[in-house]
Image: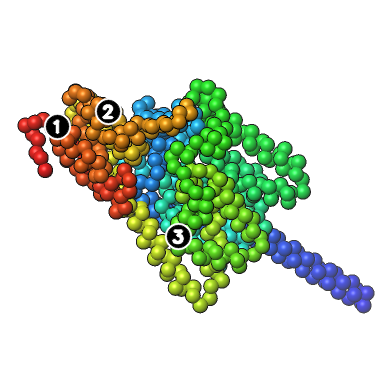
Amino acid sequence: MRREGGEGSLAFRGLQNRSQEIKLRKRKSVLYLSSQEKSPGRRGGLLGENACLVFFTIALRILNCFLVQTNFVPDEYWQSLEVAHRMVFNYGYLTWEWTERLRGYTYPLIFASIYKILHLLGEDSVQLLIWIPRLAQALLSAIADVRLYSLMKQIENQEVAKWVFFCQLCSWFTWYCCTRTLTNTMETVLTVIALFYYPLEGSKSMNSVKYSSLVALAFVIRPTAIIPWIPLLIRHFWQEQKKLDLILQHFLPVGFVTLSFSLIIDRIFFGDWTLVQFNFLKFNVLQNLGTFYGSHPWHWYFTQGLPVVLGSHLPFFVHGCFIAPKRYQILLVTILWTLLVYSMLGHKEFRFIYPVLPFCMVFCGYSLTHLKMWKKPALSFLFLSNILLALYTGLVHQRGTLDVMSYIQNICHNNANKSSASVFVMMPCHSTPYYSHVHCPLAMRFLQCPPDLSGKSHYLDEADIFYLNPLKWLHKEFNDDASLPTHLIIFSVLEEEISAFLISSNYERTAVFFHTHLPEGRTGSHIYVYERKSKGKLNRR
């Protein structure tokens, strides 16, 4: 009996231990699945984040898109939309950079694809041609914003991520640029998403192929995109144990495929094999010919460029640089390196350093996280100062050159005989968009300003010659009535100087558009449209 009891007891204990083992295994399995769900690749929602956060960001950037109705720089149109329009609709204008093959077709091809789809659907109205590319850019910028938030949540915590995200969304310069069809905007988007996959300390989403592919694509679109990545790539190579594998299995294949893709696209549209990235770097970096469009002192990015781009974020950026952990040193080195490299080039612009602005937001967010007593006033200050500047620059400053395009659209669409109408934009070259914002084969002309590529000592472009003596130039250029355009578009500062020509040629002012409160040089506060009338219909104002 005792033996039986002992055996039964042993059997019972064995069964109990076995059931506990099964439970433990089950618990381990649940924990394992839980950790899988928390990993970046398997999280729920969109882009691995809460769907509400993603939809909020997208909705904000769409609103951002419609609240930016001003002009920034010519490249927003002339290096993207104008090229795309010509690719699809077979009329338009290509600047000298395309004839000299300094630009590639990879970036315009994105918008050309959008235009082609709209054309095939019979929905290629001018308003859709203007807004759909910008909405596409807004969507990409929203994805980059979410990726920045996800990255900070991985390497820090949700609190830091929240304030970095806040700084990114309320940055006036990001608001001003992130929905524009600039190569700098796409460069910034690709840089931020690539950073999400870069092996930063604490990152759970690192992937060498993904981040190097994005960097390579950014380089193809704008070769100077490699500048911020030089210290990051060196750091990755230095820390990588299998250095040869990193180069042979990741960097070289990615670089080869991406560059081949770019070469094939440019071969199709140029008709010859062309390495535009080399031409671009040769012109802008090695020959430094970009100074034709203006030059600044070496310290400009430190004394004006970065402070203006950061705006009211500047004190928080400085504070964040001092208190941020050591692992953020690589981001600070990247910012300083980028500023130093661009400082060595004569031609400087605010947009050139836009790709490192999200890096700066990391330090700003870290600063806000560690503020205790002054956090609420600081948040109010940042939000109000940035929103006011964003709304002013997005809705008021330099809007006339876009508003006048609506008038030109009407000239074309309301004129029964389109061949009889013609427009001459007598403003600094590339002041306005062109056929991408008219979408009508109207005869148009503007003052040319290609740089000197022949090495002449005293070179003047057409715009320079015109502004030396506008009245003389006009009388020489239009020596008979038949050659006169039906419409002239000028800045208000030019009106008095050419008033004699306007009167003698029977031009009447028919429209006025506000442009800026800060007129400067050849740019006036308003834009005037003059239409040529017959003598019987002339109504002097």
Identify the residue shown where x is 45% and y is 37%. Answer: 292
The disc labelled 1 sits on which kind of residue? Ser
**Counting residues from the N terminus, which is met first, the one under dot 1 or under dot 2?**
2
Binning the other alpha carbons within 10 Å of mark 2 as few (below 14), some (14 to 19) or many (20 upward) gives some
Q: CA distance from mark 1 to mark 3?
A: 49 Å
Please name whichever residue, 480 or 266, is drawn nearer the observer in this view of the structure.
480
Mark 1 element type: helix
Image position of 130 (left or right of 230): left
* Quadrant in the rendering for residue 35: bottom right
Image position of 14 (left or right of 200): right
Choose mark 1 or mark 2, whichever is in front: 1
Identify the residue shown where x is 42% and y is 31%. Answer: 458
Residue sitting at the far right: 3
Asked if residue 263 is positioned above or below residue 16 in the image, the reply reads: above
* Quadrant in the rendering for residue 475: top left
Asked if residue 74 is positioned above or below residue 271 in the image, the reply reads: below
Please name whichever residue, 490 or 183, is drawn nearer the observer in this view of the structure.
490
Residue where numbered disc 2 is placed: 443
Residue where numbered disc 1 is placed: 504
**Counting residues from the N terminus, which is met first, the one under dot 1 or under dot 3?**
3
Residue where numbered disc 3 is placed: 311
Q: Kindly tell me whether residue 418 is visible in this rendering.
A: no
Mark 2 element type: strand
Asked if residue 514 is positioned above or below residue 216 in the image, the reply reads: below
Identify the residue shown where x is 40% and y is 64%. Answer: 385
Where is residue 110 drawn, in percent x and y? 46, 37
The disc labelled 3 sits on which kind of residue? Gly
Where is residue 47 drawn, in percent x and y? 54, 53
Identify the residue shown where x is 46% and y is 44%. Answer: 295
